Amino acid sequence: MATLTLPDLPIVQKAGTNYVSDPLLITTETANAASEGFDKKSALEIARIINHEDAKVAAAIKKALPEIAVVIDTVARALRDGGRLIYVGAGSSGRISALDASECPPTYSTTPQQVQYIMAGGPKALASASDVNEDSPEIGQRDIARRRPTRKDIVIGVSASGRTPYVVGAVEYARARGAKTAAVVCNLHTPLAEVADTTIVAEVGPEVVSGSTRMKASSAQKMILNMITTGAMTRLGYVYDNLMVNVHMKNAKLVERGIRVLMTVCEIDRDTAIRTIKSAGKSIPIAVVMLKANVDKMEAVRRLTKSDGNVRLAIEDSRLEL
């Protein structure tokens, strides 16, 4: 009979810290009393149990709003000053990070360089598991080193357990190179919190299926990353009122959205919106400034350049101190 050999797990705990060293004591790994006998439930009962547990996510995030606000402003400053937001994750956390990074360019016209992600196993791990790599802090350090983090950047480690060695290693390396760092975790007293400047803790509790952190933990992470990038882009002025004025019109749906945004912001008819968008070089921010400030395209561009792309400030022709 073949013998099963278990790999040695890396130790990320440091002397003098108060980390939870036993995985069985980590909240996201414990059994959930609310889902006992889960495999004997009907489909409706399963859905009700999951829905009941999911309802706890927003309340857990609410407790971390002050830390989320700090990270929002840190990201906004980094991007305004020419730096980058770089997410680091593994498994479900890495996939959530990749999703948020990939949605910023079409929503806010950021470049792929401004909001990035790295994850254990690389892009191929988006579709297939790469569990071995997440156990290596050295691989995390190597992968973030390739991005050459600097004082202008912010690196955010995303890990439900807060103890994923790959993520801890990457964030620790980035901080040592002067980058601002943050952590998004779902447990207290974690190694990742120790190496990050700011830690956002969404303590969602045990999962319906024990240890399946693609459920409540990932939902919490998705909501938090949404808050961070939406908040930062809004602080940068890429949102006017509550409208997506920096939308990147790359397909029919987004073109139509841009037209509606301009119609709403400037209270104009569709034909006027289309003509203005064309004269603005298909740029909604330029079109908005042209109409709201009653200026030509050249002046609108000058104002947007002066305001670092902040649409409201370009209209007012002043600057905001973030």
Image (cartoon, rainbow, N blue to C red):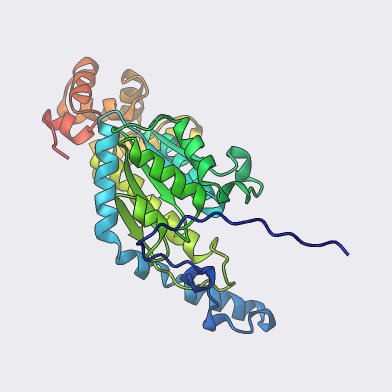
Question: Residue 145: image x %, image y %?
Answer: 45, 33
- Establish if 230 lies above or below 194: above
Where does the N terminus fall, quadrant-wise?
Answer: bottom right
Whether residue 139 sits left or right of residue 191 in the image: it is right
Q: Residue furthest front?
A: 15
Question: Residue 121: image x %, image y %?
Answer: 60, 42
Q: Residue furthest top?
A: 298
Q: Residue furthest right?
A: 1
- Establish if 84 lies above or below 19: above
What residue is drawn where x is 33% and y is 45%?
Answer: 181
Decide which of 299, 47 is in the foreground and name it.
47
Where does the C terminus fall, quadrant-wise?
Answer: top left
Question: Residue 92: image x %, image y %?
Answer: 55, 54
What residue is drawn where x is 47% and y is 39%?
Answer: 141
What residue is drawn where x is 41% and y is 64%?
Answer: 19
Question: Residue 204: image x %, image y %?
Answer: 43, 69
Whether residue 186 sits left or right of residue 62 in the image: it is right
Decide which of 296, 273 is in the foreground and name it.
296
Q: Is residue 154 visible?
A: no
Whether residue 172 sits left or right of residue 320 in the image: it is right
